[in-house]
Image: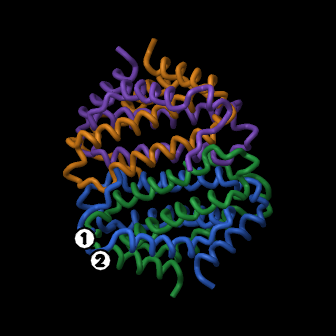
Chain colours: A blue, B green, C purple, D orange
């Protein structure tokens, strides 16, 4: 079984066993996702620029690993509640990005967002 | 190959082909993740409570699928840059949550965060 | 002095006295803002819908007050670093919203975001 | 009248005139705040480090001004719904920060968050 499908199934079982499905509407789960991304932000916010390309501090990597895991778990749960196949959507989005930003025209140029 | 490892490899190739690695430090990628979670929030923010447990509007599901995919792609990329095995961390975190919130003592009770 | 200008001046002095201006670039401050909004999200994420219109729990109001204050302080600091007059921008935005959403055509209808 | 109190009163009138109070529960407003912070993040995410201390691009400043205004307007509205005096809370928080981080012991040292 793929790892995203496996995590989805395990999160669903975890939720059902605790009768937590009642809390897992789209808005609450998006807030939970926001909370976890906020914890990632707190870990990296004051890193000096020069240190921000690798993680040499083992304690920081450990903390980041935990917070990124929390983001993934809520993301997987949110997709499951919304009836979305996350692996499939990500693969399709990557393909769209590959067409939208051809390597030749975008080499070394940050995508403009504004 | 597992789907998270596959997405990680494809995002790394996508980045390298465009020479975008220079933009992908921890802080910039966390900001990109924040931007994508913000787009998810905008999609669900005004949903009525009663509608917030399922997605019956096919257009909303499609939009949500795209935004959740964006969140996953940046998450996978951030973990890769930080040297974190996301699938492994998520599996470990789920196990810790299973011990931390035994089903018997937490059935139907939302975890207290404050 | 208006309260936003006063907070801006005090945050600038607070930062200067600690020589923290070196950390206060736009990206770091936006990450700090993200972290604080994440803490607000964690406080409200599991609230039942029926409880989510008022705050009767005095402890929750206190915690929310602290986190909303943190959001405001980083917001004010970010605007100052970016050379933005926040009070003026907010007043102009409110006026634009008043024209963009005339009361007569939008009564009781949530603004569509997707 | 202070500017935060003035914005609060105007946002309340704006909401009432459109009968939008029904959408303004704590969770929905926190999601709206998340969406706006996400838009700020999208504006700054790919800025080069060297450019991230000032805003010389007038178009970027304009866009940032609009998004920071949106953050403030939702923040003010959220505080109003929660029965929180935002100006008072921010002043108290700043005083607590002044005691918690005495200038002498924290000069030039980023606050540790992990």
Quadrant of the snapshot with the C terminus of chain D: bottom left
Pointer 1 chain: A
- Give the percent coordinates (x, y) of residue C49: 73, 42
Q: Is residue C110 above or below residue A43?
A: above
Are the numbered discs 1 and 2 placed on the same chain, yes or no? no
- Give the percent coordinates (x, y) of residue C29: 35, 44
- Give the percent coordinates (x, y) of residue A75: 58, 63
**Label annotation for residue A107:** 1
Determine the residue positioned at 34% across, 14% down. C1
- Give the percent coordinates (x, y) of residue C44: 63, 43
Determine the residue positioned at 62% across, 57% down. B60
Mark 1 touching mark 2, by CB under 8 A? yes
Task: Please tell me which residue lies in front, A69 or B61.
Answer: B61
Determine the residue positioned at 37% across, 32% down. C76
The residue at which mark 2 appears reads as: B17
Question: Which SS class for mark 2?
Answer: helix
Task: Please tell me which residue lies in front, A24 or B87.
Answer: A24
Mark 2 nearby-residue class (10 Å; few <14, some 14–19, many ≥20):
some
Task: Please tell me which residue lies in front, A22 or C42.
Answer: A22
Which residue is the extreme one toward the bottom?
A: B1
């Amino acid at each position: 079984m793929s790892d995203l499908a496996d995590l989805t199934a395990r999160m669903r079982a975890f939720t059902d066993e605790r009768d937590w499905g009642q809390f897992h509407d789209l808005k609450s789960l998006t807030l939970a996702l926001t909370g976890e991304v906020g914890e990632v932000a707190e870990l990296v916010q004051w890193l000096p620029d020069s240190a921000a390309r690798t993680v040499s501090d083992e304690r920081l990597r450990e903390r980041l690993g935990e917070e990124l895991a929390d983001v993934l778990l809520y993301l997987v749960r949110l997709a499951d509640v919304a009836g979305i196949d996350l692996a499939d959507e990500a693969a399709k989005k990557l393909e769209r990005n590959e067409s939208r930003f051809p390597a030749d025209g975008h080499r070394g140029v940050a995508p403009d967002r504004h």
